[in-house]
Amino acid sequence: MKVAAHGPNTWFLFEESGQYFFDARVSHSFTEWSVLVQLTPQEYREYHAIGRLYLDYLAARIHNFPGEYSARDLTKERGSEVMRAVQEWRAGNG
């Protein structure tokens, strides 16, 4: 897994073997967490058609409606891989 793109302090896009994963930061009141989802074929098409603007939109959507994405959240299963990819990306000066 490697960082493909990022939105400072809001999201990361990861690529692994042709699959894309999107990690968005969510904060409400005094709590903060991330939601990691694999892009659906539709989300992937929109990303490639619109680019970063679509990822900003998706991050805002996840932030405002995290419950709609909870069933797709892969943070528990893939969180350590995400952290490792971000650490490697930062070590390479992002």
Image (cartoon, rainbow, N blue to C red):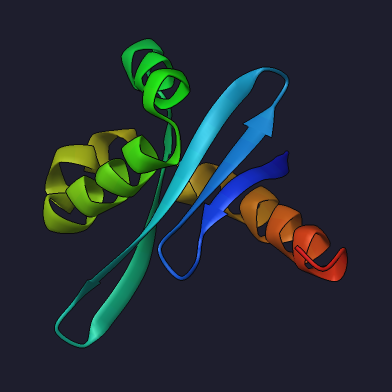
Residue at 31% x, 75% y is: 32
How many badges with numbers are in the image?
Answer: 0
* Residue 46 sits in quarter: top left
| Percent coordinates x, y for residue 59 in the rendering | 31, 50
Residue 28 versus residue 14 in the image, above or below = below
> Looking at the rendering, in which quadrant would you find the C terminus?
bottom right
The residue positioned farthest toward the bottom in the image shown: 30
Relative to 38, 91 lies left or right:
right
Quadrant of the image for the N terminus? top right
Q: Residue at x 67, y 17 (%)?
A: 18
Q: Is residue 9 above or below residue 24?
A: below
Which of 49 and 25 lies nearest the eye of the viewer? 49
Q: Quadrant of residue 38?
A: top left
Residue 47, percent from left and from top: 42, 26
Percent x, y for residue 82? 63, 52
Vertical side of 15 occupied by 64: above or below: below
Q: Name which residue lies at 65% across and 55% down.
A: 80
Report if residue 37 is visible in the image: yes
